Amino acid sequence: MSLIASDLSVGRGGRPLLEGVEFSVAKGTALVLRGANGIGKTTLLRTLASLQEPLAGRIEVPREDLIYASHADGVKAALSVEENLAFWAEIYGRPLDGAVFTTFDLEDLRGRLAGTLSAGQKRRLGLARLGVAGRQVWLLDEPTVSLDRASVAAFEAVLRAHLASGGSAVIATHIDLLGEADVLELEPFRAAVVPETADEAFL
């Protein structure tokens, strides 16, 4: 297994959102997280990525295997597309492989300042960080937001290639991405709401 979550509880601002979450993701496979807005998909991904502590439970995964792609693209507007990717390659201690520009349809945008890109182009640039990091476990929070249909299909191909090479992924998405992937419905893990006491209602 590349990632295991055992009896995991997560929350935001001290308020529990999900309790007792259990799953495992093997190498070469993906897990899709599903649930209503606000249920805790992003909070769960951030906890898996070690960006916040779990309220309870255990996560088993080597931290050096992880990369998290959030709603934010992580793009530096004052740098060019190529400079952005060179920066991330340096952060991850890897050479910048020129193939990433073709893979994420950025070849014609190499010299463009990131701040001048469209929303979809910025999204592709943000996702291209996955291609330079060399990490095995991808944690993806709505990765196809702002992408057109062709770009979604291209990213799905990138994701399939990652899995075929032995990587794995946990993905929060509302679209039918990787139709054969396992799906974890989060509603059964929604934390119970503690009723307010009479005194608390007036605080």
Image (spheres, helix red, strand yellow):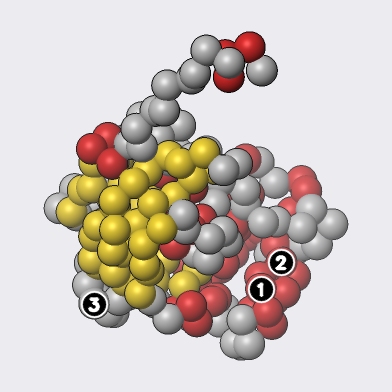
Percent from the top left, x then y, of residue 202?
63, 12
Q: Residues within 10 Å of mark 2 (few under 14, many from 20)?
A: many
Q: Could you tell me if the residues under marks 1 and 2 are in contact, i.e. CB atoms within 8 Å? A: yes
In this rendering, would 31 be left or right of 197?
left
Specify the quadrant of the image occupied by residue 150: top left
Q: Which mark is residue 84?
A: 2
Percent from the top left, x then y, of residue 16?
46, 41
Residue at mark 1 to residue at mark 2: CA–CA distance: 6 Å
168 and 147: which is toward the camera: 168
Identity, as a three-letter code, of the amino acid under mark 3: Met
Look at mark 3 in the image and give the residue it sits on: 1
Q: Which residue is located at x 22 percent, y 72 percent?
A: 26
Specify the quadrant of the image occupied by residue 159: bottom left
User: Between disc 3 and disc 2, whose residue precedes?
Assistant: 3
Is residue 93 depicted above or below 109 in this figure?
below
Residue 40 in view: yes
Percent from the top left, x then y, of residue 127?
53, 59
The N terminus appears in which quarter of the rendering? bottom left
Look at mark 1 in the image and give the residue it sits on: 88
Identity, as a three-letter code, of the amino acid under mark 1: Trp
Identity, as a three-letter code, of the amino acid under mark 2: Asn
Is residue 179 depicted above or below 61 in this figure?
above
Please tell me whether mark 3 or mark 2 is closer to you in this view: 3
Q: Residues within 10 Å of mark 1 (few under 14, many from 20)?
A: many
160 and 36: which is toward the camera: 36
